[in-house]
Image (spheres, helix red, strand yellow):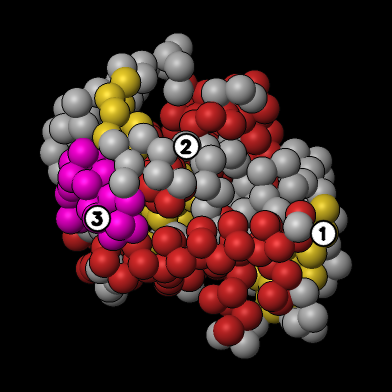
Amino acid sequence: MRCVITGGAGFLGSHLTDLILNEGHEVIVLDNLSTGSLSNLFHQISNPRLQIKTVDVREKLDIDGPVDIVFNLASPASPPVYTQRRVECLLINSEAVLQVAEFALEKGARLVQASTSEVYGDPLSHPQIEHHWGNVNPIGERSCYDEGKRFAEALLSAMRLEQGLNAGIIRIFNTYGPRMHPFDGRVISGFVRQALANEPLTVFGDGSQTRSFCYVSDLVRGLWLMGNSNQPGPINLGNPIEQTVLSMAHLIKESTNSESEITFEPLPSDDPVRRRPDVSKAKELLGWEPLVGIDVGLREVINWQIETQRAFSEQIS
């Protein structure tokens, strides 16, 4: 098959590129490199089945030849990034989604939209089930991302009903793994960076808020299964094992043999108190469930950050 991945040079996109290439298919990566990096794809750069195009997907897409599946991952997902680029984030999840959807219609391709658990906001029910409508602040600090993704879901649902767009929506819960930038602002990448540097591990609030951490190889496998289905979604993808942020800080400190202290800062505005996906639909409709345990996944992240820091130090020495 011939697949297009928007945002393919990013954290998730590069891992999805690896999976599809390893399955023997062709991949066309579209990325404006505003948050992604070509370094995430260097190991594949000589692969004849990979094309990389530097484009802004808010503009009309022009790719010759057939396309079977389009994976739309183009959006900033790091809180420190999107809260500094709010208007851009909203446009990427509206104008760009429309361009990608029209491209998929033109090609007769399946479209998989990467949505997010943030559409549930600070959930009123637990665990989060796809038919829950969410509790989102439309004018809050995080609204550019939360409401942008909610609009994208509404737009694609409307185009599916009115124009026959073959679109499937995946709601992604907290994902971690190698290639996530150490300053990304997410829990595991940030704690590992701080622990390796013996810096204080910054816990917001009292650390009792929960997250459910899914390793990246599990997540992209779910995206691939969704691409090869006709399910409209939305379907949750995430690990249903719930952990407090404070317990994760202690686990990472122990796993890195760090001397870091754990410090506490005020909880950011609209930060959700609980996160845990109900993945029953993913199991039933896609035959998917997470396989990688936190011990294995953490070891991969720690080793990757160590190797990345070593390579950087060698370059500047």
Which element is circle 3 on? helix
Residue 22, given in percent of the width and then of the height, sits at 58, 84
How busy is the neighbourhood of tag 3: few (under 14 within 10 Å), some, or many (20 plus)?
Answer: few
Residue 14, given in percent of the width and then of the height, sits at 61, 64
Outermost residue, top direction?
139
Q: Is residue 105 above or below residue 122?
A: below
The residue that appears at 24% across and 40% down in the rendered structure is 245
Which of marks 3 and 1 precedes in the sequence?
Answer: 1
Q: Amino acid at mark 2?
A: Gly
The quadrant the N terminus occupies is: bottom right
Which quarter of the figure has residue 283? bottom left
- Which one is nearer the viewer's eye here, 119 or 67? 119
Q: Give the residue at mark 3.
A: 254
Q: Which mark is residue 53?
A: 1
Outermost residue, bottom direction?
24
CB under 8 Å between discs 1 and 3: no
Task: Report the Cα–Cα distance between label 2 and label 3.
Answer: 21 Å
The residue that appears at 31% across and 71% down in the rendered structure is 296
